[in-house]
Image: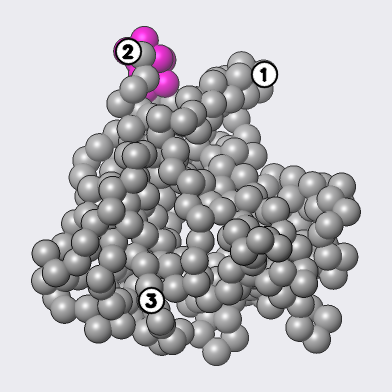
Amino acid sequence: MAFEIEYAKAPLGHKIHGLDLAHLKEDEFQQLKNIWNQYGVVVVTGQKLAAEQLLDFSRRLGALEKFIIDAYNLPSNPEIFVVSNVIENGKPIGMADAGRMWHSDMCFRPEPSFGSVLYALEVPLSDDGTPLGDTHFASTAAAFDALPADLREKISGLRAVNSFSARIAAAAERGAKDASMDPVALDHLKAQRDKAKAEVPDVDHPLVRTHPVTGRKCLYLSELITSGIVGMPPEEGQALLRQLMDHITSDPFVYRHSWSVGDVVMWDNCSSMHYAIGDYQLPKRRLMYRTTIRGTRPV
């Protein structure tokens, strides 16, 4: 290989050095894609990408889809979802609190996203220069493999309810209690909460799904977005979901990524979940561009 892989101690989150995603040869692309499918989350370091170059690379991975809230999409390239705390002309240019819980992208849709690509343009730093806004990734495939046999049998065939409106409502409630959150961003979030409830109905998916490329079994749920288990009393369903979330997010299955400008993190929304730490606020700026790879109905 013409590039180097720096393996993480976790089952995912391996760093790839020495690739230029803007000028990727076909054999390099296929090797990168195979590594991504094998591990679920990879980090490609040292990139300098214009918006169109990010889109061109992402389209090689599959058809793209827009984020469901148009207000957070880049006006010049709406297939790019802007993740940012920056306010311009009195309005947020992106979603300020994106990913502040364990989740799998677009799990609230009938055909959830297959994968996501997130590119760091600006990373907030602490006063001593330490990056802020780390992102945790957990392997839902490795977590499934490690389940006791009786629990695997118990959850086989169960379906989980996923609710986008519940996620937005929880984010708005959390923001209202967070003194550090910009009031303009909070007002925008509250407006999106009401829109989400009206326009995005709940959906149910298998609690254990099969990876569409590798065939691995993966746990499939998200904190707050997954609101219950079909046919199970609410209290019992919540207890089971909490048990599985605690298992997935335990140390053996988790990689914590500390961002640098130029990092491109690719994650697979079937075999992994993630959440971002919100330990920064303006004037410390965070700006990232995300593209989203279209998926299929989970089985």
Does any portion of residue 31 appear in the rendered image? yes
Circle 1: residue type: Glu
Residue 26 point in image, percent of width and height: 14, 75
Q: Residue at x 59, y 68 (%)?
A: 123
Circle 3 SS class:
loop
The outermost residue toward the top is 150
User: For this view, does 265 lie left or right of residue 290?
Assistant: left
Residue at label 2?
149
Is 134 inside the magenta-drawn segment? Answer: no
Residue 1 point in image, percent of width and height: 11, 64
Q: Nearer the viewer, residue 122 or 147?
A: 122
Mark 2 → mark 1, Cα distance in angstroms: 23 Å
Give residue 235's mark: 1
Residue 98 point in image, percent of width and height: 63, 58
Camera-near label (3 vs 1) is 3
Camera-near label (2 vs 1) is 2
Q: Quadrant of residue 217?
A: top left
Q: Quadrant of residue 184?
A: bottom right
The outermost residue toward the front is 128
The magenta segment is 149-156
CB-based contact (under 8 Å), mark 2 and mark 3: no
Disc nearer the start of the sequence (2/1): 2
